Structure formats: C-alpha cells, structure tokens
Image (cartoon, helix red, strand yellow):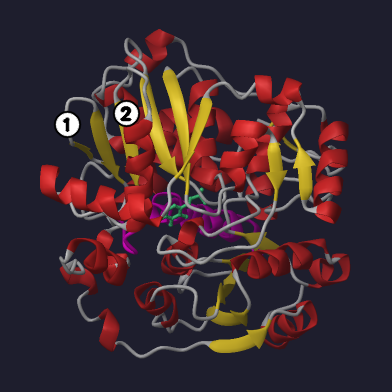
Amino acid sequence: MRYLSTRGQAPILDFRAATLAGLASDGGLYVPESWPRFSDAEIAAMAGLSYVEVAVRVCRPFTAGALDDDALRAIFTAAYGRFAHDAVAPLKQLDHRHWLMELFHGPTLAFKDVALQALGLVFERFLAESGQHITVIGATSGDTGSAAIDALAGRAGVEVYMLHPDGRVSEVQRRQMTTVLDANIHNIAIAGNFDDAQALVKAMFNDAAFAARFPLAAVNSINWARLLFQVVYYFTSALSLGAPHRAVSYAVPTGNFGDVFAGYVAAQMGLPIERLVVATNRNDILHRALTSGDYSAGTVAPTDAPSMDIQVSSNFERLLFDLSGRDAAALAAAMAEFETTKKLHLPAAWRARAGLFTSARVDADEMVDTMRWALAHTGELLDPHTAIGLAAARRDTGSAPMVTLATAHPAKFPAAVEAATGVSPQLPARLADLMRRPERYDGAPAQLQAIEAYIAERARAK
Ligand SMILES: *Cc1c(COP(=O)(O)O)cnc(C)c1O
C-alpha cells in the first residue's frame, strides 16, 4: 500500500516511511492511496477469531511489504498481552439496544493504549531494522501522553518529548506521564491550552531546519498507523453483534477525530455501519461542521472531559480529503484558508458525502444525568467522555444496535465522577500506588523557540 498526503505536495511513502513520518512535509496528513475492501464472505470468516487474529486480517492490506502476518501477529500478541482483559475490547450490554465497548483495559486506562502499545513495538522494530533513532514529539490533552509514554519508555532508538497544557490535565493523567522516570522520556508542561501545545508540535514539523537536524516522529493521531490499529475494534464488535448480516451503529466521544475516523475506515472496508455519531462537549466545532457546514474554531472551553476540549481536530482533514472527492489541490486551498482565518464553510457537495455521520453536542448537565442514569439502571460507572458518548447514543433514533465507545476508565477522572454520582471510582490494583510515586517534569512557555531549544539541548542530532 502507498500513502499520499491530503495536500498532494509531499512524497508518496510506503507504510514504514508513513509510520515514521507523522505529518507530511506539505502540512497534510498521510492516507492510503485507496481503501481495501472485504467481501461479506471475508468478513463472515472473521467471526469467532481472537482479537489478535482479527487485527492481523484487518491490518495486513495496509502493511503489506513492511509487516507480514507473522510480524503483525507477534506485535499484537505482545501489545495486547499487557491488557487486563483477554477480549481486549469487551462489549457490555446496557439495554435492548445499547452496548458499551470497553476500550480502557490497557496499561494507562484509556483507549489510546490499544493503538499505542502496538505502535511502540512497530517503531522499535523499524528502528532496529535500519539502525535509526527518532525523536517523538507529541501534544497531549492527557490520555495520548500517558499512553505514548507507557508504550515508548525505555525503548531503544526513541527519545520522547511530550507537551501537556499546564494545569489542564487531571492529576491522575499528569502522574501517569510524570512518574515514568526512564531517561528517554521528557515531559514539558506548557503555559497554554491543548491547541497551543498541538500548534507547537505542528510548527516543529513545519520548521524545515529543525526537522532536518532531528528525525521527528509523531504519536498523535496524525500518525496513520495509530488510526489503523483502532479500526480493528470496530470489526471485533460488529462481528459480535451480527456483522456482516446486520449493521451496527457507533457513538464516539470525539476530540481529534481519530477514533471516529477509524470507524469511517472500517465502513469503507465493507463493514456494515449504519451510523457514526460524533459526540462533542461544548467545544462543538465538529458538531457545527457536520450539521451546518460551519467549520470555524472558537476558543477552547475547559470541561470535565478534557480529551475532547479541542477546537481544531487534526484528523478531520482526512475526512475532508475524501469528502472533496480526494481533490488535494482543493483541500490544500481550503486548509490554507482555515489556517489563516480559522474559518471554513464546507461546500454542499462535500457535506452530501458525509451521510454516514451524525453528531450531537452534550453539555455538562446532560453528561451528569447520563452518568447517574447509567449507574442507576445498569450499575456502570462511566467516565465523563464515555457519558457524553452514551448521551449522544441515546438521542439517536436509528434501529441498528448502538455501541458507545467507553474511551476511559472512570478512575482517570475521579473528581468529576464522584461529583456526578457520589461514588468514588477506584484505580485498578496495578495503579494503586500512582499518587505516591515520584514525578519529574519541566515547565516552559508556549513559544516555539523555547521548546526547540529544550529539545536541542537533550536530543541526539541526525
Ligand atoms: C483521546 C480521547 C478522546 C478523543 O479521541 P479522538 O481520537 O481524539 O477523537 C475521547 N475520550 C478519551 C477518554 C480520550 O482519551
């Protein structure tokens, strides 16, 4: 499979190079040249297979030439062997129509472990083959950072610089990053919000002189391999609920549009998906874009679901590329306009191709009500992100079974969960001493020069 940039001006890469590149050199994102498609018979043949075996089948068309079946199997077996649940992404029934897919059984209790545990092993393998080393830079609203750090700590050839917005991640999230003391892990608390941190990372990738000195790689969901590994659990869950003979819908708590884009990819590959419900909190740029075409960034309002406190969703560009009819020139022009004016009106023709998606904006009261409803009616304690997803799911009027992606364990957000339900969620035993472990991190202003200088002092140049 070959990978091209959504903006059409960057070199075409194979899977290996696209995985190590992160952002394309023209500012775009790498996407596969075409969507491989399974027949119904091929999908039916996956029913009853283990998570690892479904993952091999779903990923192999995308990794051909770089990772064969045995390599994929070894990577997934090691990555998901670290999960606390053998099903990896188990489904839990809530009522006759609604299901939760629990994606938080990995080492850092959020769905990002599913992709990043595998990506860490892929990086290590590619780097060992070539003798290269890479500098991973990332911005996190909390969960990406901890999942990436856990996946990359101590790995040969990888140096990690993780930017988080100072004071805007929960204490559990911060500690999951800053208590990892391996020498290749560097945490930086930025004086700013998540969008500032993400803009700094993008600016480093776009700084040709800096990128020429340090071989930069991304672990944010701009990394294609990360999205690919998330496609797998759409397949396992739909198979459990009757695919390919019956369609399934999904409600996805959304921030950077990575997780729900993986659902879109699954649909392009032939999985029968009736609807993808994009759930946002009051930071609702995606809801406005999908309902009225108004893709304009406001200012970020901090909420109890910080991983969704985003105004600019990087991966939305990957969807826009398809909605434009894969017209890279038109998309590059649209994104250039968005980058200068922070506004874009989606043309009617583009929106007409987005029929798989609906959206919902869920504010704090409805989130709290949903947490209370779930506890009273099903006994489930939900984290704030999952509650927003379930609230959006419960508004949907379709007929297919509806799966809400449970993206984090409630104990990652104990204050919000306790305030809503009166119940204090307990950290699983493997993390019980987190609040007592020593921390290490540095603060920095949200200025490109300061961050680049910090990295240059510590990183190995090319
Ligand atoms: C990252 C995250 C999200 C948002 O996922 P995207 O792929 O960025 O849309 C939602 N919930 C939780 C708990 C997360 O960590």
- Asked if residue 30 shows in the view, the reply is no
Placement of 199 over or under 358, stated as above or below: below
Respond yes or no on whether mark 2 lies under 8 Å from ligand 1: no
x, y percent for residue 103: 32, 48
x, y percent for residue 38: 48, 16
Residue tagged by mark 1? 95
What is the quadrant of the N terminus in the image? top right
Identify residue type, mark 1: Asp
Placement of 6 over or under 244, stated as above or below: below
Task: Say whether residue 125 is magenta.
Answer: yes
Quarter of image, res 350: top right
- Ranked by sequence position, the earlier of labels 2 and 1 is 1
Q: Residue furthest front?
A: 365
Picture disc at residue 139: none
Mark 2: secondary structure: strand
Alpha carbons under labels 2 and 1: distance apart:
10 Å
Picture disc at residue 402: 2
x, y percent for residue 106: 31, 57
Respond yes or no on whether mark 1 lies under 8 Å from ligand 1: no
Tell whether 309 sits left or right of 12.
left
- Asked if residue 84 shows in the view, the reply is yes
Q: Residue at x 58, y 57 (%)?
A: 310
Q: Residue at x 26, y 60 (%)?
A: 410
Identify residue type, mark 2: Met
x, y percent for residue 171: 37, 78
Residue closest to the eye, 13 or 271: 271
Task: Say whether residue 19 is magenta.
Answer: no
Quarter of image, res 126: bottom right
Mark 1: secondary structure: loop
State the extent of the magenta-drawn residues as a range: 106-133
